[in-house]
Image (spheres, rainbow, N blue to C red):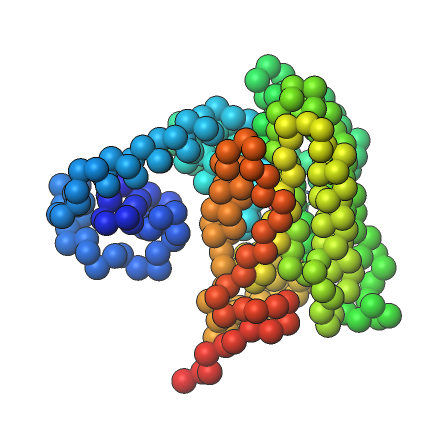
Amino acid sequence: MRIYKSSRILTYNNNSGYKENGYKMTKRPSYIVSTSSKSFLPAKQTFSKHFYIFALQLINKNRMEHKIVFITGATSGIGEGCARKFASQGADLILNGRNIEKLNALKQELNAQGTDVLLLPFDVRNRQDMKQAIDSLEGKWKDIDILINNAGLVIGVDKEFEGSLDEWDVVIDTNIKGLLAMTRLIVPGMVKRGKGHIINIGSIAGDAAYPGGSVYCATKAAVKALSDGLRIDLVNTPLRVTNIKPGMVETNFTVVRYRGDKKRADNFYKGIRPLNGDDIAEVVFYATSAPAHVQIAEVLVMPTNQATGTINYRQPEK
Ligand SMILES: NC(=O)c1ccc[n+]([C@@H]2O[C@H](COP(=O)([O-])OP(=O)(O)OC[C@H]3O[C@@H](n4cnc5c(N)ncnc54)[C@H](OP(=O)(O)O)[C@@H]3O)[C@@H](O)[C@H]2O)c1
């Protein structure tokens, strides 16, 4: 269900609740007086403004209609947010992750809304499984328009001279080698077809190292270099490459960082309003829906009360 109020667009859906201009609202907007669909109609909206917003929505939707979007790490956080956003804009989705139960649940939810979804569960660290899965694609699914290299993680906050080499292997193999292998397998088809967009989910961590993050920061600095390098290698093609660098986003990421300690993860966000997966999905969507001659190379996106990877403002506890 959707209403227009001035230049604001309010949408409601059973799973994600109220959203204003695509952004999740924490509570029911005060200007809704009743949940009956009639009361959702704008009171003082001029026809032309109403029509203009509707037309913009339609153009964006048509741009995305039946495009094939491949998202790695779609079972949670930013990847899951991207799946819902692109589904809402008419794209067909190939969703990857390791948690098959979560992938199935997401597929069911999106199918119910009319989105065509193909699941490709594999570990991005397993090059053989990845190749087998991608080689198995048939028909329209082979022609991937947008690749969102999102799967990634960090484990621990150890000092570089104290942490576990085995854990760091997992982080490096996922964040760098997994992303690189996906790129190597999917981009040749895009080049052949003369169209495609590669979105790499980097991080503010790739701009400067912070305490306890050296290996993760190094992997995200690598994502920046791989994105820049790919953009150079594709400069004579219509393909686009975007490195999206989020700051603080509340997802399962911090739970994994603290090795499953949910309480510690919750404390990490105390006193500050972090971004969520849907906020980043909006930025990803914005980059992919820009006109074909516009390449958004890099986006750094943070909560309003964050200034750098280490500097943020937190409301004191009352
Ligand atoms: N949250 C933040 O503050 C933040 C900030 C900057 C950048 N990022 C980046 O954003 C990306 C998404 O993270 P998130 O915040 O959405 O975290 P999240 O909620 O923990 O989601 C991570 C996703 O990656 C998948 N994944 C992890 N290892 C995988 C593997 N080996 N193979 C396939 N899928 C794998 C997970 O799925 P399965 O467990 O099902 O495999 C999950 O769907 C990551 O690259 C992260 O570095 C996050």
Query: Does 313 appear above or below 298?
Result: below
Q: Nearer the viewer, residue 234 or 170?
A: 234
Q: Nearer the viewer, residue 262 or 306?
A: 306
Would residue 132 be seen by someone viewing this image from the given angle? Answer: yes
Residue farthest toward the top in the current orientation of the protein = 139
Q: Quadrant of the N terminus?
A: top left
Going 35% across and 48% down the picture, which residue do you hit? 21
Q: Quadrant of residue 144?
A: top right
Query: Does 185 appear above or below 140?
Result: below
Q: Position of residue 241 (x, y in %)?
A: 65, 39
Q: Quadrant of residue 149?
A: top right
Would residue 36 be seen by someone viewing this image from the given angle? Answer: no
Q: Quadrant of the C terminus?
A: bottom left
Relative to 110, 7 lies left or right? left
Going 49% across and 59% down the picture, which residue do you hit? 275
Residue farthest toward the bottom in the current orientation of the protein = 318
Q: Nearer the viewer, residue 276 or 242?
A: 242
Going 61% across and 68% down the picture, which residue do you hit? 308
Going 25% across and 57% down the picture, which residue do you hit? 29
Q: Position of residue 178 (x, y in %)?
A: 75, 41
Q: Position of residue 121 (x, y in %)?
A: 64, 34
Q: Position of residue 196 (x, y in %)?
A: 62, 29
